[in-house]
Amino acid sequence: MTTDTPKDETIAASNGGRSLVEKSLVKAHIIAALAFMVCSMLVGLIISFQFFNHNPLDGVSEYLSFGRLRMIHTNQIAYGFLVNGFVGMLYYAVPRMTGRPVLGKKLGWIIFWVWQFLIFMVTVGLLMGRAQGVEWGETPTGFEPGTFRMNFLPVDFLIEFGALLVAAQFLTPLAKSVHKRMYVSSWYISAGIIWLILTYVMGNTLPEWSLAGSSGGATVGLFIHDLVGLFVTPMGWGLMYFFVPIILRKPIWSHALSVIGFWALAFFYPLNGVHHFLLSSIPMSVQYGAVISTIAVEIVVTTVVVNFFATMWGRGAALRTNLPIRWFYTGMVCYFITCLQCSFQTTLTFQEYIHFTDWVPAHAHLVMLGVFAFWILGMITWIWPRLTGCDWHNRRLNQWHYWLSVIGLVIMFTDLTAGGLVHGFMFAELAPWMSIVDSLKPFWMIRTVAGLMIVIGQLCFAWNVYKTAMGTGKPYDYRVDLVAIEEK
């Protein structure tokens, strides 16, 4: 029986001899997450050449056209990298928070292989042109639009069934926790799992089968934003509330602020989605409500960020000496900037200039890569030696990974934001479309260089993960982390 600590042996004995943490499942989901991340980023890098007429796949096949590859880039990050990354960390965090193992190890392997198969089929379906017209929800329904005539595997419905299995796997130990009170991480994780099921059905089933026109558009807007706000965000913050205190070896600064952040997220975030469709046929009262609630989310985020930075008090050296903490807090700064930016860009005034410009992908990359991907990468950096029992094959490669990713993201975000403003102001001045395109090409070239830096960083990390798993490093010394967080 493999256990993490002597304490785990006691807990395992009280759970029928089962190990508290199923390490093999944690490792499997991490490996799958990194594989999808590298694949997605390579696809994104290749199609970035399209913007200045150097796409090496242009004209090769309709299956490799820009539109289809672009959807693979986003879907593999959302469902391949983020979901695998979060689920892998839940296998480590939930049993430790509850003192109970997950529902079943065999169920865990069923979930793992079925999920990888579904993401593979999503990729195949997108290449074949079977996508839905739903942003971030292009997963094929398997049916001809508006009919029950099948033209592909019904991936949509299978994903919904898979989400139910994930809920059973993790909500069971959360419901049977040995603790009388739920820690805030349990609140976020429990809600995130339930919200995922509701959000996915709302965005991938209702518009396709029962809602049309502006009603369907409003629902799709809710799905786009709620997928981030009611699944990715609760999972990210919930795991931060778990990992940060463990690494810093001190409790979170304010339990009250953590609870306020949770309930404010639950109240304001579901109202945000329509800000994706400002100045549309959706009633203006709904649009105004979305703008106001989006601005309110920035206040919510501020309370959470303050809570975490106050927790750092007396542990400032960790930002320099502890790489996972550096990943976490870099992501928190990016999250604050993202939501501050969002509170401005969703106003009608800003929308006149930045809608349909590169400002939007700059914003999306800052939150998906700079926040949630950075958090998952920080978690993997901390947990991988504990899973393998070996120290990192090359710690310097991890530093290269961090700096290439951060510098690449800063360049990309700044570059695309500036390009978006150029586009918006030229469009407002009624400049010819091709003049706008020619003006943006230098920005797109810089974006490709930045993307190359990010991809190289991920390849460095993937190689380091592989070599560490092969046992090429020294046995892991847990005392290293204790020294790394001490204030010098």
Image: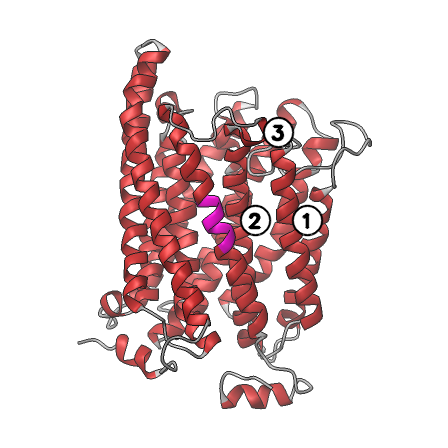
Q: CA distance from mark 2 to mark 1?
A: 10 Å
* Residue 213 screen position, x and y as percent: 65, 22
Relative side of 472 to 175, left or right: left
Q: In this view of the protein, can residue 127 be seen by the observer?
A: yes
Q: Secondary structure at mark 3?
A: loop
Write down the region rendered in magenta.
35-41
Which image quarter is the N terminus in? bottom right
The reply to whether discs 2 and 1 touch (Cβ–Cβ < 8 Å) is yes
Mark 1 crowd level (few <14, some 14–19, many ≥20, 10 Å Cα): many
Hey, which residue is sitting farthest front in the picture? 60
* Residue 379 screen position, x and y as percent: 42, 64
* Residue 459 screen position, x and y as percent: 39, 54
State the residue position of label 1. Answer: 159
Residue 99 lies in quadrant: bottom right
N-term-proximal mark, 3 vs 2: 2
Q: CA distance from mark 3 to mark 2?
A: 17 Å
Q: Secondary structure at mark 1?
A: helix
Q: Secondary structure at mark 2?
A: helix
Q: Residue at x 77, y 27 (%)?
A: 146
State the residue position of label 2. Answer: 79
Looking at the picture, which amino acid does disc 1 mark? Ile
State the residue position of label 3. Answer: 133
Q: CA distance from mark 3 to mark 1?
A: 17 Å
Looking at the picture, which amino acid does disc 3 mark? Gly
Looking at the picture, which amino acid does disc 2 mark? Tyr
Quick check: is 174 in the magenta stretch?
Answer: no
Q: Residue at x 64, y 44 (%)?
A: 200
Q: In this view of the protein, can residue 255 be seen by the observer?
A: no
* Residue 81 screen position, x and y as percent: 51, 52
